[in-house]
Amino acid sequence: MNTAFAVVTAKDVEAFAELYALVFNAPPWHEGWSVPVAAERLLGLAAAPRFEALGAYQAGKGVGLVLGSGERSIKGWVLHIREMFVAPDLQRSGIGRKLLAEFERSLAGSYTGVYLQTGSQVPAHKFYASCGYANTDLVSMTKRIEL
């Protein structure tokens, strides 16, 4: 089936909430998203300055999405990918690779680089590495806020 790619605007990102929940409730994530909470997350990400998103569509239906936002660095603007997901039944079909490549092409001329975070022990890590992404010396840290 043919796949088309199109810019997704902040007002259109909510249409991907059901797919987001489906993907991140499946292995290896098992996160437990409801569609309303997924919609809230996507809308929140879409509210960021310099929001950028590209969707993959088959027969008019969204089957994948990559989105992020820009941040100014000393060397220019960089894009932080916040989410990328493809329908479970289409993963490993090449759609994700094409979606990411199209997204990167759409950023050329406006951004000097792309950053993202993913787990070191999940299939996404190998996927991004195979697309030319490399580990950095940055460390992600977290702290729980207790009431």
Image (tube, rainbow, N blue to C red):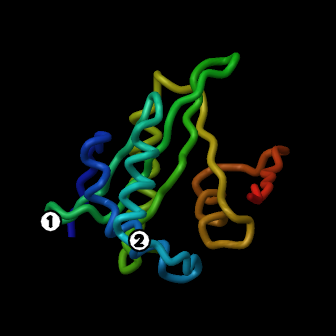
Which image quadrant: the N terminus?
Answer: bottom left
Please identify the quarter of the rendering in which residue 9 is found: top left
Nearer to us: label 2 or label 1: 2
Residue 25 placement (x, y as % from top left): 48, 78
Please name the residue that numbered disc 2 is placed on. 21
Element class at badge 2: helix
- Residue 59: mark: 1
Residue 40 placement (x, y as % from top left): 40, 55
Sequence order check, earlier mark of 2 and 1: 2
Disc 1 residue crowd, few under 14, some 14–19, many 20+, Cα 10 Å: few
Position of residue 120 in the picture relative to residue 90 (left or right)? right
Residue at 62% x, 59% y: name it: 130
Question: Three-letter amino acid code at disc 1?
Answer: Ala
**What whole-number distance in Å separates the C-alpha atoms at marks 2 and 1?**
21 Å
Which image quadrant: the C terminus?
Answer: bottom right
Q: Nearer the viewer, residue 146 or 133?
A: 146
Q: Nearer the viewer, residue 48 or 28?
A: 48
Residue 26 placement (x, y as % from top left): 48, 81
Q: Is residue 50 above or below residue 61?
A: above
Question: Three-letter amino acid code at disc 2?
Answer: Ala
Please identify the quarter of the rendering in which residue 58 is found: bottom left
Residue 127 placement (x, y as % from top left): 59, 64
Q: Nearer the viewer, residue 9 or 113?
A: 9
Element class at badge 1: loop
Residue at 39% x, 35% y: name it: 106
Residue at 85% x, 45% y: name it: 137
Position of residue 59 in the picture relative to residue 26 (left or right)? left
Position of residue 102 in the picture relative to residue 143 (left or right)? left
